Amino acid sequence: MTEVRHAPTQRVTPEESAPSDPVAAAWTEYRAAARQLDGIRRGAATAAGAQARSVQGAREELATVRARLAAQQSRLRERGVPAMALVPSPPEVTVAARSMAAGPAAVQAALRTARECADAADGVLDARGWTAVAGVWRGSRPEGWPVRLRNLLVYGPVALLVPVLQVALVLTGSGARTVLALLVGLLLPAVAFVVGRAGVGRLFRPGPDGQLDRTPRFGVLVCGIPAALGTAGILVAVLAG
């Protein structure tokens, strides 16, 4: 019997992957490096642009703050503040320098804070200025004057209307008008006094005690003297003519 011999079987190993193309691998690495480099470049450009904008903003803010401080310094010097008190001390300069050591953004923030402080200082100066002006105005208002001088502002103009009317009547040249001017000098002073007394009550406020001094005797004199002088002048002119 013939012996059948089988050919020796060979072990099948998994198929090894074909080696990758070195050119393609190099190209892939190049593209990845290029993308990374472009990202770095874009980030640097963005940071540089932001820094440039911060520097420009800080310069503009500095110019504004300098102008504000110069104006405030002039106002304070006018009010008698010593020049030495307006100069920052060395410790203040050191603290300010430390707060701005982080770069343009920190400088801009510090300048913005300085501008806010300048705004607040302007508000204080304006408030004090208006307070001083109001005080001068209150002192110059008639309520702060002596009572007779205050009331003269009302009685005086009303009293002067009487002689003015008398002169206007006499200048017409008519005898009847002259008689009417004499009657005006006798009657209208009382009317002028009543009008002046009412005007004092309307224009001025009562005092702390709730009473308003209208100085009636003084008002009678103020309203009567111009009319009396005008009437006397007319009588003298008539008698002399």
Image (spheres, rainbow, N blue to C red):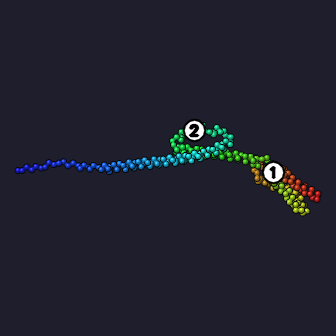
Residue indicated by mark 2: 93
- Left/right placement of residue 75 relative to residue 207 reads left
Q: Identify the image quadrant of the C terminus.
A: bottom right
Which label is found at residue 239?
A: none
Task: List the single residue furthest toward the left.
Answer: 1
Name the amino acid, label 2. Val
Q: Position of residue 130 (x, y in %)?
A: 68, 47
> At 90% across and 60% down in the image, what residue appears?
178
Q: Is residue 210 visible?
A: no
- Classed neighbour count for the residue bearing mark 2: other residues with Cα under 10 Å, few (<14), some (14–19), many (≥20): few
Quadrant housing residue 96 = top right
* 1 vs 2, front mark: 2
Which secondary structure lies at badge 1? helix
Q: Nearer the viewer, residue 33 or 98?
A: 33
Position above or below: 84 against 2: above
Q: Position of residue 209 (x, y in %)?
A: 76, 46
Q: Is residue 189 visible?
A: yes
Q: Position of residue 170 (x, y in %)?
A: 88, 60
- Left/right placement of residue 83 relative to residue 201 reads left
Give the CA distance from mark 1 to mark 2. Answer: 61 Å
Q: Nearer the viewer, residue 128 or 103?
A: 103
Q: Position of residue 22 (x, y in %)?
A: 31, 49
Task: List the single residue furthest toward the right.
Answer: 240
Precedes in sequence: disc 1 or disc 2: 2
Task: List the single residue furthest toward the top.
Answer: 91
Name the amino acid, label 1. Leu
Quadrant housing residue 232 = bottom right
Position above or below: 39 against 235: above
- Classed neighbour count for the residue bearing mark 1: other residues with Cα under 10 Å, few (<14), some (14–19), many (≥20): some
Which label is found at residue 152?
A: 1
